[in-house]
Image: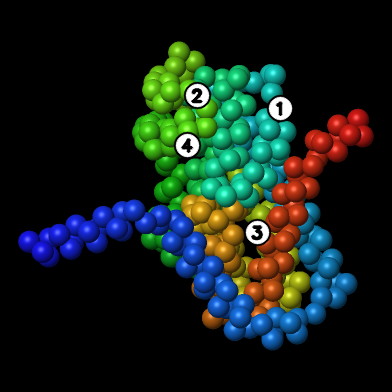
Amino acid sequence: MIEIIRNNLFFGLISKINIKLLITLVCFAFLGTSIYGNFESLSAQTITRQDISWLLLGIVFSFLSIIINAYAWKLLINNIGCSINNLNIVRLFLATNIYKYLPGGIWHFVSRYNTLRLELSNQKSIESILLEPILMLVAGFIFIPFRGFNLSLYILCWSSTLLFFPSFRQFLIKKLRKMKAKVFTNNDNIKEINLLQNSQNTSKRVLYPYGPLFVEILFVLFRFMGFLCCINAFSIGSLISQGELISSFSLAWIIGLIVPAAPGGLGVFESVILFALGSHLPEAPLLASLLCYRLVSTVSDILAALIYPVKKLFKI
């Protein structure tokens, strides 16, 4: 009897733990330990003019990747049967993308939902928001098998594209809508029942998002090119195959996307890269590359968010 009570208390405690937050804290501890252990080597790293050129090129690639990501979302919204003439989707994406750095990692979704529901039904608004990160995940899975020829890994990762076939897609949207409804209902006055009910504006014909997926794959590729520029800035890019590098990058990026307890996947992405590549590359230059990439990606997000305000300021 006492053993049963202990087990119930243990599992009750586990259920109350925020798993995502726990993973993030573990990643922060791992990253902090790595920085502390390599502090002297990190301090000895120098940045030349050529290195600065690589980092600036990394900003360019990362900046372009955000534009590509915004366009992919626009195509996705069109794919689910929505046509919005009164709203600039690319502008909405760029303006809200910076909100992902706020604690919680959901505020860019909430902001987009609050804007979209003025033009679309509640169901379509949530569907367009929930499908976008799924599209990003599938695009990221495409590159994971590139570290070597492993047929089973190719089949496993590339089978993720099946999620967008009509039967899988509708099932996925239904489940995600039930799971994530409270994210939106906690931030406005719309009742949860309105988010879960069917709408008369629902498109009867569901098309596979070939176009959005292709553009999203380009987004991941450009994102990787920004990371590769940071790797090259510290002269370690030639020490590892490009296939293994993009595979590890995609895996780290996906995990950082799934675990949003830290703003922008901070700490999670870096920890996965260190764990995956730490035995293949010198740790100090790799750490320096990761820290620079975090700076590069953040600067790119800020620049992308400023595009339309600057255009409005100078009336371009």
Residue 301 horizontal side relative to residue 130, left or right: right
Q: Amino acid at mark 4?
A: Val
Whether the residues at callouts 3 and 4 have beta carbons within 8 Å, the answer is no
Is the residue marked by circle 1 packed among few (<14), some (14-19), or many (20+) residues within 10 Å?
A: few
In x, y percent, where is residue 10? 24, 61
Asked which quadrant contains residue 8, the reply is: bottom left
Residue 293 horizontal side relative to residue 31, left or right: right
Q: CA distance from mark 3 to mark 1?
A: 27 Å
Task: Look at discs 2 and 4 and give the one toward the viewer.
Answer: 2
Q: Secondary structure at mark 1?
A: loop
Note whether residue 247 is visible: no
In front of the other: 227 or 206: 227
In x, y percent, where is residue 258? 48, 52
Q: Amino acid at mark 2?
A: Asn
Whether the residues at callouts 1 and 2 have beta carbons within 8 Å, the answer is no
Q: Which residue is mark 1?
A: 88
Task: Look at discs 3 and 1 and give the one toward the viewer.
Answer: 1
Which label is found at residue 183? 4
What residue sits 12% from the left and 60% below the top? 4
Q: Secondary structure at mark 3?
A: helix
Q: Which residue is mark 3?
A: 224
Q: Amino acid at mark 3?
A: Phe
Q: Secondary structure at mark 2?
A: loop
In front of the other: 41 or 246: 41
What residue sits 52% from the left and 19% below the top? 121
In front of the other: 18 or 77: 18
In x, y percent, where is residue 199? 44, 17
Residue 11 horizontal side relative to residue 173, left or right: left
Q: Amino acid at mark 1?
A: Asn
In x, y percent, where is residue 54? 80, 66
Q: CA distance from mark 1 to mark 2?
A: 25 Å
